[in-house]
Image (cartoon, grey):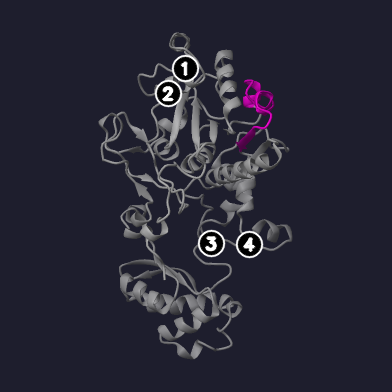
């Protein structure tokens, strides 16, 4: 039987921010993939310093904005940059680069996701950082990687979805190719970036060696393609199936009287149960239906049987019946419905910070919580995404930069004023801004 939350965390330490307590990460990123890598590491307890140009990066002003926030708080910034510290720093200026390298010398990991070669041109690439910290773990995330025929192309999430083949299989069989509603390639690249950083830290602990890590959006999406790249390379046709499953039938979304469910048969034993449940016991062991291969060959027929039985029943009734019978099923819900689900809330997948009063008197938004749960070193949303340059003084003070020096840097525009959020015009991503 499943346990309780209290039992799972019974030996939890409350004196640490997470299992990466003591690890320092320097993040120079924009938009989603790179910030997602830093987000995972920050959630795990690392001290992540996000470096942005004093004008701020695009995630700070990408709509939609969270209701009741003033100044408007972007959903991207609120989600990705929680648990981080913010340093505004112009890397186009030598003084900004010098400060970045001082921080890199003290950091375990550097994360960047600009177009390949951009940070090297600015004097803060891998070779520059390894001169000040030879054992650095330097994670570069880009659309197509640091080398290869397409490495110099600008890369974004929908492009990776298109070129990987994902788009060609997503959508209804008789409709157009459809992109993922989430930033799928960005998310996967961010996760692979964080995972690879942890692997490289383990190697450094064992050997003292640092290294450069190259993560591409395209590679990440291909790696997570359920083996389809191998099938395609061997000439296997992959038709678009919509809500149907290549490896199982009946299995898809079905309409009930008052809503849809995703349900189906993954095991032959499930079919025996389902056949009896829908009033077709004679098909439980029938040779034309008893195995997955036979049911897949008769997909339309078995889908029609199940769909017809479900159509006149209430969704909650179906879910309860299937649950008792051990048949996999779930309601097809909106994100709004998921956000109110008791199980989602019990799993701490939405977290508020202490009270509903957030930065600047705003309502503290419920932030998506970390996915992985650690029984000994719990993770959580420790603080909201910082305002631009909120930690300039504290971080530069750690480097020994005096108050007078900081004032001069502000006067020169190398760090931000620290007085407000960034102006309305973002710096284009992928290093498009000219020095």
Q: Earlier in the sequence, mark 3 or mark 4?
A: 3
Please say whether residue 333 is visible from this viewpoint. Answer: no
Identify the element where label 4 is drawn: loop
Q: Position of residue 358 (x, y in %)?
A: 29, 35
Query: In the image, which disc is placed on residue 389?
Result: 2
**Going from the N terminus, do you reach mark 1 or mark 4 first?**
4
Q: Residue at x 49, y 14 (%)?
A: 401
Residue 240 sits above or below residue 271 on the image: above
Foreground pick, 44 / 253: 44
Which residue position is annotated with label 1? 415
Q: Secondary structure at mark 1?
A: loop
Whether label 2 touches label 3, CB < 8 Å: no
Measured as percent of width and height from the top left, residue 313 is found at 32, 75
Residue 367 image point, x, y percent: 37, 44
**Badge 4: how crowded within 10 Å, few (<14), some, or many (20+)?**
few
Q: Is residue 204 above or below residue 396?
A: below
Q: CA distance from mark 1 to mark 4?
A: 52 Å
Answer yes or no: is residue 75 visible. Answer: yes
Write down the region rendered in magenta.
118-142
Residue drawn at x 46%, y 42% as measured from the top left: 43
Q: CA distance from mark 1 to mark 3?
A: 52 Å
Quadrant placement of the C terminus: top right
Query: Label 4, on which residue?
Result: 238
374 in relation to 431, above or below: below
Q: Characterize the local packing of mark 1: few (<14), some (14-19) or many (20 or more) Cα atoms within 10 angstroms.
A: many
Residue 229 located left or right of residue 92 = right
* Residue under pointer 3: 173
Residues at marks 1 and 2 touching, judged by CB atoms closer than 8 Å:
yes
């Amino acid at each position: 039987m499943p346990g309780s939350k209290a039992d799972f965390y019974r030996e939890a330490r409350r004196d640490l921010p997470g299992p990466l307590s003591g690890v320092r990460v320097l993040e120079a990123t924009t938009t989603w993939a790179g910030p997602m890598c830093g987000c995972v590491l920050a959630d795990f307890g690392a001290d992540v310093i996000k470096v942005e140009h004093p004008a701020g990066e695009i995630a700070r002003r990408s709509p939609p904005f969270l209701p009741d926030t003033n100044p408007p708080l972007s959903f991207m910034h609120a989600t990705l940059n929680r648990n981080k510290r913010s340093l505004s720093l112009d890397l186009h200026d030598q003084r900004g680069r010098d400060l970045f390298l001082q921080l890199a010398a003290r950091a375990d990991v550097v994360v960047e996701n600009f177009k390949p070669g951009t940070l090297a041109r600015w004097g803060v690439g891998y070779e520059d950082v390894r001169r000040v910290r030879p054992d650095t773990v330097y994670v570069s995330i880009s659309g197509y990687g640091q080398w290869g025929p397409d490495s110099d192309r600008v890369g974004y999430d929908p492009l990776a979805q298109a070129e990987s083949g994902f788009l060609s299989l997503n959508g209804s069989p008789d409709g157009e190719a459809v992109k993922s509603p989430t930033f799928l390639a960005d998310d996967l690249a961010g996760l692979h970036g964080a995972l690879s950083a942890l692997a490289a830290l383990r190697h450094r602990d064992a050997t003292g060696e640092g290294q450069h890590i190259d993560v591409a959006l395209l590679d990440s999406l291909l790696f997570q393609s359920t083996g389809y790249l191998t099938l395609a390379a061997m000439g296997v046709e992959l038709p678009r199936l919509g809500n149907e499953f290549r490896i199982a039938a009946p299995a898809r979304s079905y309409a009930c009287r008052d809503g849809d469910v995703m349900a189906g048969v993954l095991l032959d034993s499930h079919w025996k149960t389902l056949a009896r449940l829908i009033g077709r016991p004679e098909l439980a062991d029938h040779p034309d239906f008893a195995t997955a291969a036979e049911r897949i060959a008769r997909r339309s027929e078995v889908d029609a049987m199940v769909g017809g039985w479900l159509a006149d029943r209430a969704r909650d009734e179906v879910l309860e019946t299937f649950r008792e019978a051990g048949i996999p099923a779930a309601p097809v819900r909106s994100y709004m419905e998921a956000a109110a689900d008791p199980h989602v809330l019990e799993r701490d997948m939405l977290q508020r910070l202490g009270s509903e009063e957030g930065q600047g008197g705003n309502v503290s938004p419920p932030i998506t919580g970390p996915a992985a749960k650690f029984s000994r070193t719990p993770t959580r949303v420790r603080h909201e995404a910082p305002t631009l340059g909120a930690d300039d003084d504290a971080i530069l003070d750690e480097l020994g930069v005096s108050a007078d020096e900081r004032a001069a840097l502000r006067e020169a525009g190398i760090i931000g004023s620290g007085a407000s959020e960034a102006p309305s015009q973002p710096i284009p991503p992928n290093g498009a801004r000219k020095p």
